[in-house]
Amino acid sequence: MSETPMDHHRVAATLVEALPYMRRFKGDVFVVKFGGHAMASPALAHDFARDMVLLKQVGINPIVVHGGGPQIKHVLDQLRIQSDFVDGLRVTDRATVEVVEMVLAGKINKEIVGAIHAVGGRAVGLSGKDGRLLKARKVTRTKRDPDSNLEQVLDLGFVGEPEAVDTTLLDHLVRTDAIPVIAPVGFGDDGHTYNINADTAAGAIAAAVEARKLYMLTDVAGVLDGAGALLNTLAAADARRLIADGTVHGGMIPKIRTCLAALEAGVSAAYIVDGRIAHVILLEVFTEAGVGTELVAAAPLA
């Protein structure tokens, strides 16, 4: 079907709407956590790569941090390695952490880099171990024994959380035409490799590089209120209230807490957006209406 004059006018209107946002964010750093359905779908992954290249072309500097839980599970299942979860964190023994690093820093990372190259961009694949990017400390969790009522410390193995972020390499890369693509694998003072939750890693990196925006791609429309309606803007205090009263629950809690920590560290705004929507980042960045939920430090003035 050939394009009509109306189609051309629609494209022109879209470009006109996008122009002021291109000017506003030129030179800024955006950190994007890439995962979920968007990463599993070849079509959406292709669109995501094009979107990152377009951001770079208009002067915005994206940094991609990716997950890979389903892919890790697939390889662990093939190798018949049992893997359990505690509070959403994968218990990671020595055999498991080797698989995690292989899948994240190897297969997935290079697939994303290749996708960006395939659409005309330039990307550099990294893990948190490269350039001492992500220094990790061991994560522990506690559980109250129902019989003795005593707190027990649970050993999660080689699961870490960011202790320090060295931005030297990233500061260099954002000044070039390359897009950093980061696998959330870190190093510890003990010399061990640690598996870091991708959401947590993205938030820590966004804070360290003083990003203008942090984007979390999810498999839901955004943060919903008690009636199931999408909240377009959510102040930090209101987000904490929704967690406390149970409106926000499950896997959305750590995502919101990551966003709040980034805001407290100086990131201007954080967004939870639906990665199942094609070009969702462009829709949020370059349109007046935006999509998903924007989290801000304080409620906007009426």
Image (spheres, rainbow, N blue to C red):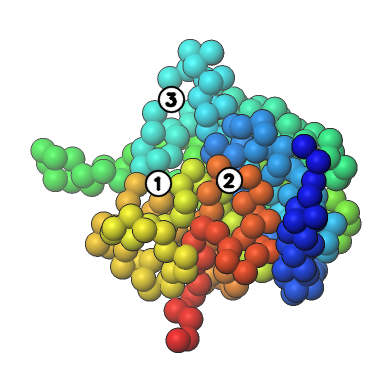
Q: Is residue 97 above or below residue 223?
A: above
Q: Please say if the residues under marks 1 and 2 sit with CB atoms less than 8 Å apart.
A: no
Which disc is residue 83 wearing? Answer: 3
Q: Which quadrant is home to the C terminus?
A: bottom left
Residue closer to the observer: 232 or 238: 232
According to the picture, the residue beneath numbered tag 1 turns out to be: 251
Badge 3 crowding class, 10 Å Cα cut-off, few under 14, some 14 to 19, many 20 or more, is: few
Q: Secondary structure at mark 3?
A: loop
Outermost left residue: 147
Residue 18, image x and y in percent? 74, 66
Give the mark, 2 or 3, whose residue is nearer the N terminus.
3
Determine the residue positioned at 46% across, 55% down.
222
Q: CA distance from mark 1 to mark 3?
A: 18 Å
Which disc is residue 277 wearing? Answer: 2
Q: Secondary structure at mark 1?
A: loop
Residue 130 visible? The answer is: no
Q: CA distance from mark 2 to mark 3?
A: 31 Å
Q: Is residue 190 above or below residue 167?
A: above
Determine the residue positioned at 80% across, 34% down.
114
